[in-house]
Image (tube, helix red, strand yellow):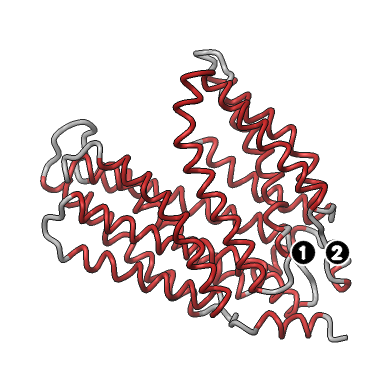
Amino acid sequence: MIGTIWDGAADFVAGAVAERMRTPYRGLVGWGALPLGLAFVSMFAMPPGAVWWALTAQIVFRTLYAFTNIPYAAWTTRLAATSQDRSLIAGLRMGFGAAAGALVALALPWLVAIIGYAGAAAALAVLGVPLLAVIAWRVPESAPPACSGTTLAIGPALLLLARNRAFIALNLAAAAGGAAVALTSQSVLYFFRYVLLDDLGGPRVLAGMALTSVIAVPVWTALASLRGARFAWLTAGVFALLLPAGMALVHSPASIATAAFLLAMQAAFAGFGLAAWTLLPDVVDWGEAQSGKRVEALAFGSFALIQKIALAAAGFTIGIVYQASGFVAGAVQTSATLIAIRWLMLAGPAVLIALMLAAVLTLPLRRDTLAQLQNEISPG
């Protein structure tokens, strides 16, 4: 819990520092690569019982990750100038991220059996650190627009973000969508174990959901490139809203039907993330066109902080609802508890997805908006 809370705070601080420094993002990523790799290994090299050292290693790693990841994410605004290109970059990032997650999940037990957790972490760091260094060395980074040359203090920059209605709508939509994803995914193991009495089904479905993301991301990327990220987000949201409504009509779903429902939900969830990360650079441009001042890295840091808060709230909600319903871990649950587990996985995400769709509809961005904004920023 402490690590997660600090994670969100570190994202915000990293965005604020990058905003004030106006240092090229590639430099921040390059210099942070090796310390990040060493911190990653240190988390798994702690001796048994070293609780405070373990917590310190978590804090150090999450801090270094934030100061590397926020510039890496914000780099999209300078790497791609069109919404179509940004959707492609977001799709590639998410697709390779999902594939890497599945690969690590499959390879980790084998690696740990041979060289232990510290050795496995070191092997992954040996792969990751050079990749980050090569990115910093080879990937180009254009300078921000000339009208954004002045460095804003954090207070005025935050005020500009608060006045950027596209940024506010995007954050509300992404927070609601992210919380819906968390409620669904964190309910899987409980639903399979206690409602379906299928202990092995939950982990298998979670693995299947990871693979589903690998397949679904290219589809949403193509739709976002063709029709715009906002359209893709609305399509994914409507699809995701219909699924729990249909599942609610099934009184006693079997494991296969539940698995199909969750895999379909995960396919829709992939569209949420793809659209949000595509539109975040766009709302930065939109805010600059409205105010004449650019808030870039701080927007990414603030966005990450708000998403972490939404995820924490979803986890807290699960704990509160389960406790109120009389949940007892490892025991046979009462009918009230089983009802709570079922409806939290169905009704909870449905309400959040409806709120997400309402926020997406208020986004003042369309397929051709970015091109119009760029003409306003650079009329020559």
Point out residue 269 in the picture as x, y percentages from the top left corner.
42, 61
Side of 323 where 317 appears, left or right: right
Rendered image: mark on residue 143: 2
Point out residue 204 in the picture as x, y percentages from the top left corner.
31, 42
Residue lying furthest top? 48
Side of 316 where 47 appears, left or right: right
Kindly state the secondary structure of the residue where label 1 is placed: helix
Kindly state the secondary structure of the residue where label 2 is placed: loop
Badge 1 is on which residue?
78
Q: Is residue 51 above or below residue 129?
A: above
Point out residue 367 in the picture as x, y percentages from the top left corner.
60, 82
Tell me the residue at 38%/57% (across/down).
Answer: 266
Side of 202 where 303 appears, left or right: right
Residue type, mark 2 in image: Ala
Q: What quarter of the picture does the C terminus occupy?
A: bottom right
Residue type, mark 1 in image: Arg
Q: Is residue 284 above or below residue 35?
A: below
Residue toward you, 98 or 177: 98
Question: Mark 1 and mark 2: span between their CA atoms?
Answer: 7 Å
Rendered image: mark on residue 263: none
Point out residue 76 in the picture as x, y percentages from the top left corner.
70, 61
